[in-house]
Amino acid sequence: MGANTPTVSKTAEALPPPTERYSVVRWLHKNLFSTWYNALLTVVMLFLAVLIVRGVLEWAFTQARWEVITANLRLFMVGQYPVAALWRIWACVALLALLIGMSWGIWGGAQRGGAIAFGALPFILAIIASDETARLALLITGIAGIVGYALSWRWSAALRRISIIGWILYFPVLFVLVSGFGADDSPIPPAPTNLWGGLLLTLLLSVVGIVFSFPLGVLLALGRQSSLPVVRWLCVAYIELIRGVPFISVLFMAQLMLPLFLPGVTIDRVVRAMAGVVIFSAAYLAENVRGGLQSIPRGQYEAARALGLNPWKMTLLIILPQALRAVIPILVGQFIALFKDTSLVVIVGLLDLMGIARTVLAQPDFLGLQAEVYTFVAFIYGIFCYLMSAFSQRLEAKLHTGR
């Protein structure tokens, strides 16, 4: 390098590009009042927003009859699940809070504001709860979340593997506790699935649909790109057939056809509905994954072959991780749609969250309270959909999918 050649320090090279900084007044002028028509549109929208928010708050605090929610809260949450077995549900919730707190402390990073908000939620619900048992259970749930978060901050590296194992074992333990086993006099007697309902049934259908449709959809996507004609055409036929019929048709098919394929085997209605959800979701997920597979450049395949990887290792270690990383927003969007589509199981006689809402509205004491009931149901759906969306954004940022 010559004597007159300027040198640049490594610190200067690492600095991000300069960004323009605005005060509040300048930001408002640039984004909301830059021109006369933007200013007019801003004023009109603010006026409409004030009218709408004022009307909603006035209705919510002065006119709405929220006793329809408090009087039927147990129905909304668990349906007709046996009261004597509710401790199992609370045990699952407390264990979930422990795992969430532990995982948030390990992988949440600087997201302490969200941790505080979710940690305070059980205590807030305990304050407004009218049932002493529910209040005690909510307090235990909040304490479990705090304990998990505190442990993860002190022993983050040691608990990382334990947390992963806990998430893997959680769902089998959940199903064992919720469904029970043995005879009626056993410590955990069976709880008939026809008594499951409300948010409990909605979450179980969603979790089963997501967990089982994901590997099935990935296999279908890989099979559709297989070099074996039989495998390829079978996968194409399955995907196009399922995607060509409505979800309700698949639910009815699962309810009516599964017993015919398995003669002599009694299949519960909830299990048949879960099978329908998995069958339907897997077909759409397969197309999403196939789009990710097609986005991988051919150079990745050639580089994997140059390293001496066989087709299985090339797919599992090189191609599939990149394809799934590319379609994270699409997959999470489908999971959100699946969570909302579970409300259609009311057509086959299952009382999920929406089914319980219709049952509550049929009570003589609460006729005509559709606004309160459906607002509460929409709030629950909105919370879970937002959580899935926030997790997707966090995962995308961690994996740097925008680069």
Image (tube, helix red, strand yellow):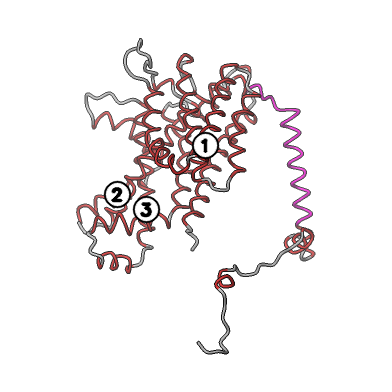
Looking at the image, is mark 1 or mark 2 earlier in the sequence? 1
Q: Nearer the viewer, residue 139 or 355?
A: 139
Q: Name the amino acid, label 1.
A: Gly
Q: Is residue 131 above or below residue 327?
A: above
Find residue 22 and report its image quarter. Answer: bottom right
| 280 relative position to 22: left or right | left
Q: From this viewpoint, which residue is outermost toward the top?
A: 185
Mark 2 lies on residue: 219
- How busy is the neighbourhood of tag 2: few (under 14 within 10 Å), some, or many (20 plus)? some
- How busy is the neighbourhood of tag 1: few (under 14 within 10 Å), some, or many (20 plus)? many
| 250 relative position to 225: left or right | right
What count of labels does the image hold?
Answer: 3
Residues in magenta, as a range: 42-68
Q: Secondary structure at mark 3?
A: helix
Measured in 3D between alpha carbons, the distance from the residue under mark 3 to the one under mark 1, in whole angstroms, is 34 Å
Measured in 3D between alpha carbons, the distance from the residue under mark 1 to the one under mark 2, in whole angstroms, is 33 Å
Mark 3 lies on residue: 287
Residue 17 lies in the magenta-colored region: no
Looking at the image, is mark 2 or mark 3 earlier in the sequence? 2
Q: Name the amino acid, label 2.
A: Leu
